[in-house]
Amino acid sequence: MLVHLQGPWTPLFGRLTLAQIPYHNGIVLGAFIFAAGAGLVIMAALTYYRKWGYLIREWITSLDHKKIGVMYIIVGLVMLFRGFIDGVMIRTQQAMADGPHSAGHLQALHGYLPPFHFDQIYSSHGTIMIIFAVTVVLTGFQNIIVPLQIGARDMAFPYLNAVSLWLTAAGAALVMISLFVGDFSHAGWVGIIPLTELPYSPGVGVDYWDWALQLSSLGTTLGALNLITTIVMMRAPGMTWFRMPFFTWASLSTQTIGLTAFPVLGVALALLSADRYLGTHFYTGGMGGNLMLYTDLFWIWGHPEVYFIILPAWGIMSEVIPVFSEKALFGYTVMVAATLSIAGLSWAVWLHHFFTMGAGPGVNLFFSVSTMLVGIPTGVKVFNWSLTLYRGRLRFETPMLWAIGGLILLLVGGLTGMMLAIPAINYTVHNSVFVIAHFHMMFLVSVYGIFAGMMFWFPKVFGFRLDENSGRKFFIFFSLGTATTFSAMFTLGFMGMTRRLDYLYDPHWQPLLDIEEFGIFLYCVAVFYFFKMIYVSLRDRAKESHGQDVWSTSRTLEWMTLTPVPYYNFAVIPEVHGRDEWASRRESGFEDSGPEEYEDIHLPKNSIAPAVIGALAFGFGFGMTWRIWWMAGLSLLGIIGVVILRSFADQSGIVLSAEAVRRMEQKPEGTGIITDHISPPVAELEALS
């Protein structure tokens, strides 16, 4: 039966009361005013320019893998910005709250964040950055690029692709609304046991965290199944396994991890939900429970997740470095083998996250060796990238700068990771900010890969380049912020500073904390140049438009399409004759040769069902969080009903005639991703009419 909780509960609103809205908190109130203002500006702009129909018709109902990928990236970038603000707040609090004589502000004894609020900030920071920012953005890149690289028209299951997106968006929305209605978890992004159990967290914060991760985990699992099927079944004629572009190999390895790891997270959170809602004792200290069961289950997912977010970034770097070195990737076959090895070894290293738990020297030795083994294929990658650069005709445009920056950070993160793989060293620095600095180095490799990919593929998707001048300044200040912040953090870790501190007792740490804060300021300058880059690029897009191969030395199939990529991708599915097909055609003088004959193209109809499922999933998560049982029940029934009703819609798709394709290829201005009135009709609306 359901656990009875202390405090008010009503059948209509569950545990939700007006007192749960933290309007008395100045920081939260300011964030709400900013978010509401931004939302009103966006809605006013959509209304003024009459773009609501365009938004629904061309984006919200779209099953086009490119538009779904772009929406993934937009969601991820919004969450990345939110997570960055959390990081700024954490470092500012620590810089202000060092020593017994540090002043207090805004109801805080030291600094400006009370402990309970600080705990929520660091919990949301980790959750957002790992699950809802980097993971989501990289999934977006894979959605956009993988079908293009293998010569496919779309994903294997376009409808399922959209469902995955909207489930992920529903999870992100739960995290965002927790800022304004109730509280977020204070048990860390990992859900520290027993803090996530009801006696220690009777509020709704852990429930927000739980259901947000459950929904996003389901979306990621479905997306992994879709991408694997796409790569295995939809490659163009002639594209054998060892002719696939390396980013596609990295995506295949990544999604294999996702398909096998995220269900483990789902099980771990389902058992936690049973403890919190049904009164079971899977993770309690008594009554037959086991505290370490959750820790093992979480990190069995958690460490493969580390490679889930870093392998695609390495794939991006492996595409960018050859293009701007003007030579093929060195050791392609060995790089593929290294990637598959890392994906396999990711399952054998999870216990290094808690060497200090007392499992014994034999267990620690096994996981220490397995962790060090990961360094071998990782080192292979570093050497192969270096040998690709060696004697290449290097061009240091912004994608290349980000790729090389990621390579340098990988050396720092990898070497400190080898240090932490040694149990004796791990015992010394466990739970210190040295570990945090190491993880951020590895995490930032993914971030550098993301920005390399954004600069690299943006012109292919949208038809114009991002501003080079602002992009370089963005890279410079971001890199300076990284070096400044985390060199100080590594040092503080050696000096004994532990993680998750809202108050620091040692005044001798103040100089290094101030250096960290200066690094955060440099990051803020970098964010300014990022937004300036977007603004200038949009303003000058007519001057920055380019043809088919934006960089002139690109190598893979996505550069064979028109720029921007038309919604049908390829006029005729290409036949592949070797690795780096586009480079081979360019070098042979066949880059301008079009198809002799065009053919009819079948495309799926748009669907409103995935977005409705996402909205109902949000309602289910919100209802379960606040124990508003009618909302949760109706939302679940609604999801089932939408799936059933969807089965009655005409799913035969539409056919784009060969003559229409010919006209679009000859006059491609109206086929790009932002063009209005080109999407297929919405299947459900046709059924209703």
Image (tube, rainbow, N blue to C red):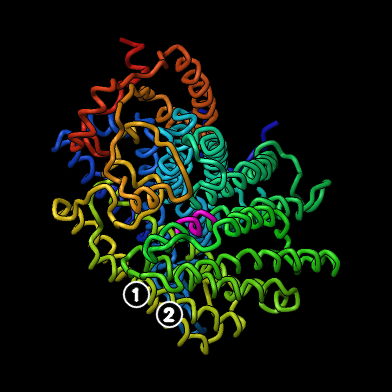
- Cα distance, mark 1 to mark 2? 9 Å
Quadrant of the frame with the C terminus: top left
Q: Assess disc 1: are there few (<14), some (14-19) or many (≥20) residues with their C-alpha within 10 Å of its C-alpha.
A: many
Amino acid type of disc 2? Thr
Magenta segment range? 311-316
Magenta-span inclusion, residue 315: yes
In this view of the protein, which residue sits in the foreground, 267 or 207? 267
Determine the secondary structure under disc 1: helix
Name the residue: 63% across, 63% down: 377
Crowding around mark 2 (Cα neighbors within 10 Å: few <14, some 14 to 19, many 20+) is many
- Judged from this view, the residue extending furthest toward the front is 588
Q: Nearer the viewer, residue 317 or 434?
A: 317
x, y percentage for residue 639? 50, 24
Marks 1 & 2, CB-CB < 8 Å contact: yes
| Residue position for label 1 | 522
Magenta highlight: main SS: helix
In this rendering, the answer to whether 51 lies above or below 343 is above
First reached walking from the N terminus: tag 1 or tag 2: 2
Q: Seen in the image, is 204 located left or right of residue 27? A: right
**Rendered image quadrant of residue 399:** bottom left
Residue labelled with disc 2: 484
